[in-house]
Amino acid sequence: MKKPKKTLKSLNIDKSWTLFLDRDGIVNKLIVGGYVCKWKEFKFIPAFLKYIGRLSGKFGHIIIVTNQRCIAKRLVSKKGLALIHKKMVSAIKKRGGRVDRLYYCPHEIEDGCSCRKPKIGMLLKAKKAFKNIKFAKSVVIGDFESDMEFARKAGMTGVLISPKTAGIGGTKADYVYEGLEAFWKAIK
C-alpha cells in the first residue's frame, strides 16, 4: 500500500521555517528570451505583492535566490542589478513584506561556478549568514525544474508555481500550484 503524500499543511510551517524564492517568474514577470536589465522592465507579479506580507508573517526568513547571467552577458552591471534589487525590496516593504537577504549568481551557464542553480552555493551562503536555517525546514518556490532540483539537492521542500502544469505529474517538485494564492491557502 502506498504511503499518502504529506500535505503542506501537515508540515506545520511556522517562524522556524525559511522560504527561498526564485525571482524571475515568482516575484516579477519573466521576460521570455530576455532579461530584466532596468527598473522600468521590472514588473511585479500581482499575486506576489498580494501575498508577500502574509508569507513574511508565516516564515522566519525570506530569501531570494536568483540566477542572473545577464551580468556575465554584460547586459547589466552589478551596480545596475543592485539598484533594481534595492527598489524591489523597498516596494516589498511598502506592501508589508520583507526580504531578509538576496543572493544572485552572476555567471554564465558554462562557467562551472558553485552558485548557479541548480547547484547549492547560494543556499550555503544563506546558511552561513543565518545559523538557524535548517534545509529540512525550508521551502523553495520556483517556476523551473532547475529550482526543484536545487531544492532536492539540499533536502528542502520544492514548490513549483506553474499554471500550465498544476495537477500534472512528471516534475521533481514536491508540490505544484497554479500560483502563490494556492500555495498560501495550502499553508495557512
Image (cartoon, rainbow, N blue to C red):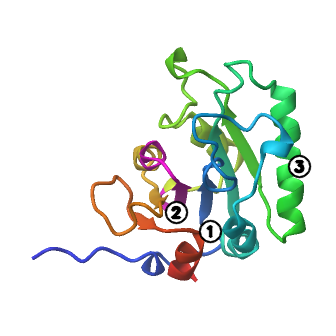
Q: Quadrant of residue 18?
A: bottom right
Q: Residue at x 42, y 46 (%)?
A: 145
Relative placement, left or right, of 46 versus 112 is right
Q: Which residues are magenta?
A: 136-148
Relative placement, left or right, of 36 versus 66 is right
Q: Amino acid at mark 3?
A: Lys
Residue nearest the observer in this picture, 35 or 98? 35
Q: Does 24 appear above or below 173?
A: above
Q: Secondary structure at mark 3?
A: helix
Q: Which residue is mark 2?
A: 137
Q: Amino acid at mark 2?
A: Lys
Q: Which residue is mark 1?
A: 16
Q: Does 106 appear above or below 100?
A: above
Badge 3 crowding class, 10 Å Cα cut-off, few under 14, some 14 to 19, many 20 or more, is: few
Q: Secondary structure at mark 1?
A: loop
Q: Marks 3 and 1, how far apart in space?
A: 28 Å
